[in-house]
Image (spheres, rainbow, N blue to C red):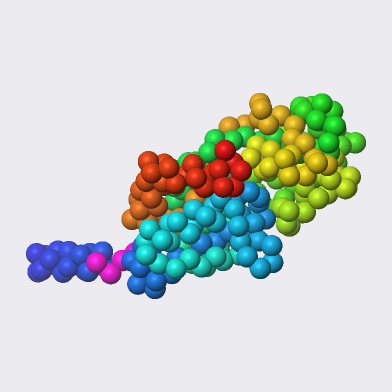
Amino acid sequence: MKKISLLLASIVLVASGTAAADQLEDIQESGTLRVGTTGDYKPFSYFDGKSYSGYDIDVAQHIAEQLGVELKLVRTTWKDLLTDLDEDKYDIAMGGITRKMQRQLAAEQTQGYMTFGKCFLVAKGTAEKFNTIDKVNQPSVKVGVNIGGTNEAFADKHLQQASFTRYENNLDVPKAVATGKVDVMVTETPEGLFYQVTDDRLEAARCETPFTNSQFGYLIPKGEQRLLNTVNFIMDEMKLKGVEDELLQKNSLK
């Protein structure tokens, strides 16, 4: 009886392993890759009300093409990024997402791409005034951050004395700096430099020597190793074949 029980247990384990969900297989069977993105973080993911653009949108399209499926973009927010991924609203989250331990514990993170750091976006001509944490960490300084992202976490940790305004939409923060509603936006080097080039009312402070060093990555549901391996493989191929450089140049990131 003991041998029979062990045999039955083995059969159950094998059967359950065979029946285990496979996100990559589901994507191929459905013919659609669902990508979650905030659409509010130039130049990685931007939604203008009609269509999406940005570096990570182009990468998402490339991944879908490599998999031989259609791309479906799903709108999410920074605070719901992991929750929506866990609730199977999309297969992968993309759009200037910082790799960090908190996200690694809740999901799978792809290999990193593009090293960057935290810096400030300020009004033109005020970079010297707001180029250190000590200068910004003052009750008289108005700081703007988007809710739910790593910029908010950085501000909460390092700028506790400053006056905060928190925005649901990241696109509203540069506008607030440009119109004088806030003095400083906590941002990251690619975004800071992007706005410095595209809006003559703004400039980046400390982008040459950022306060932190990190990399961007993509989020995949926890345990989906085959999908993770496949996306990492596609990212490697993008580097080898020059696709990454082409897309970086297209989006003014190189």
Q: Quadrant of residue 100?
A: top right
Relative height, residue 99 to residue 85 (above, below): above
Residue 21 forms part of the magenta stretch: yes
Does residue 14 show up?
Answer: yes
Q: What residue appears at the point 54 percent right and 44 percent down from the top-left corner? A: 248
- x%, y% of residue 221? 45, 58
Residue 201 forms part of the magenta stretch: no
- x%, y% of residue 103? 52, 48
| Magenta segment, prevailing SS (helix, strand or loop) | loop
Circle count: 0
Which stretch did the figure color magenta?
18-22
Q: Quadrant of the N terminus?
A: bottom left
Specify whether 110 is left or right of 73: left
Q: Quadrant of the C terminus?
A: top right
Relative height, residue 237 to residue 45 (above, below): above
- x%, y% of residue 194? 68, 42
Q: What residue appears at the point 62 percent right and 31 percent down from the top-left corner? A: 212
